[in-house]
Amino acid sequence: MGTPVIRMAGVRKTYAMDGVQVHALRGIDLLVEAGEFVAITGSSGSGKSTLMNILGCLDVPDQGQYWLNGEDVTRLGGDALARLRNRAIGFVFQSFNLLPRTSALDNVEMPLVYAGLAKKERHERAAALLQRLGLGDRVHHQPSQLSGGQQQRVALARALVTRPSLLLADEPTGNLDSATSQEILALLDELNLGEGLTIVLITHEHDVAARARRQLTMRDGRLEG
């Protein structure tokens, strides 16, 4: 078996809130192989958002180590973390996080601007992804002109446009109705099973988590399952 996409050993994170020490992560060990689809569930305050931030290189642990595609993330500074995020990780959020007065096409192209790709290649890659996700006739629409499901498809296209090795989906169906949620989950299934994309899904909904091939639970800063 090749290098795991995610390997964590003894990861801990503590915050000081109002003078009180909050132990958000209490020694996380996690291994995710290439091509896995893993769901992490947990109640509010369980530590799953902190774990997601560290997995996504948006934060770093106080103790322990995290390797992403074999690279020791805990040794990287801010600029190197930003480059790694842009190159290796795609993010999908509950709130879509699209730029409001910007077309779907320009939203999807944005990560490629930061990656330094030429305009023609950015445009072609973004347009092809939107077409593939059923939005070929919506490329020039702004988010306000799109339904919730269409906005999440734009967000998914933006997450995929850099061709990442890891997709992190944080409550991706949280703002969608049940039918649209199933459409988004079917797309994740297709990306995982059809293309071998490694996916880590954070959710509090057990029926959503059930779509993954492996389910884990966060409880009081520890990972179970």
Image (tube, rainbow, N blue to C red):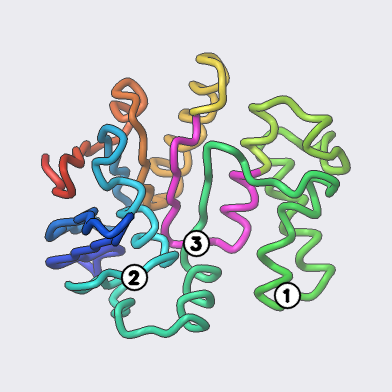
Percent coordinates x, y for residue 56 in the rendering: 41, 61
Percent coordinates x, y for residue 70 in the rendering: 28, 76
Q: Give the amino acid type for the residue marked by disc 3 in the picture.
A: Pro
Pick out the residue farthest to the right.
140
Between marks 2 and 1 in the image, the one whose residue lies nearer the viewer: 2
Tell me: 197 left or right of 110.
Answer: left
Q: Earlier in the sequence, mark 2 or mark 1?
A: 2
Q: Give the amino acid type for the residue marked by disc 1 in the picture.
A: Leu
Judge whether 75 appears above or below 190 on screen.
below
- Name the image quarter holding the N terminus: bottom left
Percent coordinates x, y for residue 141 in the rendering: 86, 38
- Circle on res. 150: none
Name the residue carrying label 2. 60
Q: Give the amino acid type for the residue marked by disc 2 in the picture.
A: Val
Region in magenta = 155-173
Name the residue carrying label 1. 117
Percent coordinates x, y for residue 152 in the rendering: 62, 36
Judge whether 41 appears above or below 70 on screen.
above
Q: What residue is rendered at 30% in x and 64% in y?
A: 5
Of residues 67 and 26, the one drawn nearer to the viewer in this rendering: 26
Q: What residue is rendered at 35% in x and 62% in y?
A: 54
- Circle on res. 164: 3
